[in-house]
Image (cartoon, grey):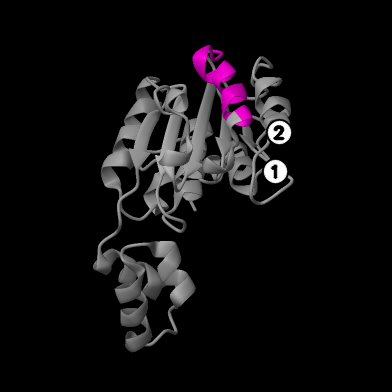
Amino acid sequence: MTGFKDIIGNDLIKEQFSEAIRTGKLSHAYLISGDKGMGKKKLARAFCEELFCEHPTEGGACGTCPSCRKVLSGNHPDVIWLNTAKPDVIKVDEIREQIVDTAEIRPFLGGRKVYIIPDAERMNQQAQNSLLKVLEEPPEYVIIFLLCSDETALLETILSRVIRIRLKPRTDSMVKEHLRDRFPDSDEEGLDLAVAFSRGNVGRAEDIL
């Protein structure tokens, strides 16, 4: 994957992110929502690649510089993915230790520091209240991505402090073209079936196929 250009669909969202990175007019917190398989993690990773790329091109991130490679391999010191001990809940200690207590530490390589919280709806109320400490008074270099499938599980105080982005389903033609590229040996009947049941969700289409 190389930046936004390898993300299927949601062109307006990609253009807005690219423009914000280009101009430096970035928010301190974004909420990306959408069903499982819609590409929330891919979009957040592409954002980080574009943000930290050392040799950006007109098409976006180069994909080959040390920073791009670190982002793609999950080893960039300024891109922190929240790690959790249990699959069903994000506890206050995990938010405090991995985000709240480290937010004041300045970036190691770049001018920004990005925290990414997958399945943010799993945060219990105490964890969300702890995160508010950073959302209310974030260091100027911090950007937080909350990725979620259910916005209703988040406190209104959280929702009021983030830019909310909702991923839209892709068209059938987009999904089918992607599947054909990803699984070149698939027959047309299988492709059509996966597209029909995916309802524009690329990850779901891949699972079905």
Q: Quadrant of residue 111?
A: top right
Query: For the magenta stretch, what is the residue range?
Result: 126-139
Residue sitting at 66 percent across and 21 percent down?
Answer: 100
Q: Nearer the viewer, residue 57 or 38?
A: 38
The answer to whether marks 1 and 2 mark residues whose Cβ atoms lie closer than 8 Å is: yes
- Farthest residue toward the front? 125
The residue depicted at 65 percent of the width and 38 percent of the height is: 82
Quadrant assignment, res 182: bottom left
Residue picked out by circle 1: 84
Above or below residue 82? Residue 10 is below
Q: Is residue 171 visible?
A: yes
Pointer 2 local density, CA inside 10 Å: few below 14, some 14–19, many at least 20: some
Task: Identify residue for label 2.
Answer: 94
Q: Calculate the distance from the C-alpha at mark 1 to the C-alpha at mark 2.
A: 7 Å
Q: Position of residue 197 (x, y in %)?
A: 34, 74
Estimate the x, y position of residue 200 in percent, counting from the top left.
31, 63
Amino acid type shown at disc 1: Thr
Q: Position of residue 66 (x, y in %)?
A: 62, 39
Q: Give the mark nearest the N terminus, 1 or 2.
A: 1
Prevailing secondary structure class for the magenta stretch in the rendered image = helix
